[in-house]
Amino acid sequence: MSKVFSIVDFKEGLDVRKTALTAPGGSLRILENAVLTPGGEIAKRLAFVPMTTIPGSGPTIMIGQGDALHVFGVDAKTIPAGSLTTPVIYHQLTGFAEGIPELLDVEPFDDKFFVCGRGVSGTSYCWYNEVPVLEVGGTASHGTYARTWKSKMYRIDGKYLRFSAVNNPAQNDPASVSEPGAGFINMALNDPDGEQLVAMEVYFAQMAIQARLQTQMWSLDPDPTKDTLNQLVRIGNVAPRSTLQFGTGDVLFLSDSGVRSLRSTTFTTTAASVSDVGSAIDPLLQQVLISTPVYPEKAEAIVQPVTGRYWLGIKDQVYVLSYFPAGHVTAWSTFSLGFTLQNFAVVNNHVYALDDTGVIYEYGGASGGDYDSSKVTIRTPHLSADNPTENKRIQSVDVMCQGTWAISIGMLPNNTEAFELCATVSDNTFGLQSIPFAGYGTHFGVHMEHQAPGPAVMAALHFNLQEGFTK
């Protein structure tokens, strides 16, 4: 008996929670250098096009603000002249005798910037408007992460949440009458897991302040006597710069278990609960956390402004969340960068990436639509066509796609890594003769690759099956 089995959307995206023989239809085992469209089809990613190079070897960090990229470092540098599509402004940080091998965070405040860095001794330092921030008595201020909120600068310093005076990030004197509002909160007094804070992010009208094993939800006011702890959530953060607002109020971040989200428990309250939005790729990220523990701490997140996708960059990989509720699409994929990521930045509707050698890349190039020849790889689970104990013969295959794709099929349930090339196709095959294939077995998987300049899309697969006997 013959039947047609179709895969007409891939809206589950990358999902490795189950084995290749039990994963659901619509999910994928590999989805590299591509994203899910709002309609559930797979589209090739754009190119990362080199734009300019920051000279020298000292530490740098980059942020987008206004219509320009702002790069910060401790050495004197001159940005190479040329026809840059986006201005690049360099800021030299001065004032400390100790060497500064690492810059940790940068946060805008009133057209100026607050920067956190770490010295060779492990001591953290802060700058505002390119000069050191000092405490009362002239000692250096410390901080590893900063956030502007309600006219003050908040910063993470070990177990302390420190905050500046109103309208002046450089004023840290709690006794100041002319510039009031400065002070600190010892987060470890509320729960011992708060002894080493990591990051913070605005969550509706609250601030989510995160350690590795917990998140404290605070209402913070310009008047520090009104600061209030509202809730403690038993989930934490391992990567400060992975923390990011996403969608309509959610906060996404990298925890020990994978990407997690703080979201409202109901539509009528902003009490936080934890969502496992990243559970589909938990096994991948957990392996990264174990095998390369240094790099997850440097993970960098951004929201791509045109499509609203969440990007989480770790070393030379980007984990991408395509989230389109109207199309019921919540799908992960990966990008292979070809360089080691330092950090991302956004200017207007363009994403920029700074690598560890000082090269700045523009995603999509100046036009916002440039492609390269990066290889797109797609692999489905081994599917049973709703009958896992029945043998089937694939008589032919039809493909709906754009661009040139190599289509390979595997039908060995005891070796889900084995695939045989079936055909190389361009665009759809509906007006052509069917593509024959002589495979036979209980399950079948498809491995697809595209590597050529220009855009590419994989939209649908159709299998003409000859059903056999039940085992």
Image (tube, grey):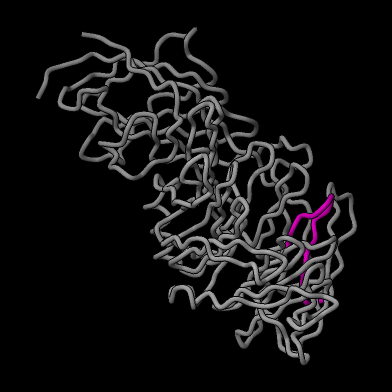
Q: Residue at x 28, y 39 (%)?
A: 416
Furthest-bottom residue in this view: 137
Residue at 50% in and 48% down: 263
Disc tally is 0
Q: Is residue 174 above or below residue 425?
A: below
Question: Which residue is rendered at x = 71% and y = 88% of the image?
Answer: 98
Please give left or right for residue 261 compared with residue 306 in the image.
left
Q: In what quadrant of the picture does the C terminus appear?
A: top left
The segment highlighted magenta reads 62-75
- Asked whether residue 340 appears in the rendered view, the answer is no
Q: Determine the image quadrant of residue 375.
A: top right
Q: Residue furthest left?
A: 471
> In the image, is residue 69 part of the stretch drawn in magenta?
yes
Q: Give the answer, above or below, for where 317 lies relative to 389.
A: below
In front of the other: 153 or 376: 153
Please provide percent x and percent y for residue 355.
Answer: 66, 60
Which quarter of the rendering shows the N terminus?
top left
Furthest residue in direction front, as rendered:
225
Q: Position of residue 400 (x, y in %)?
A: 49, 18
Q: In the figure, is residue 15 to the left or right of 104?
A: left
- What secondary structure prevails in the magenta region? strand
Direction from residue 452 to residue 32 in the image, left or right? left
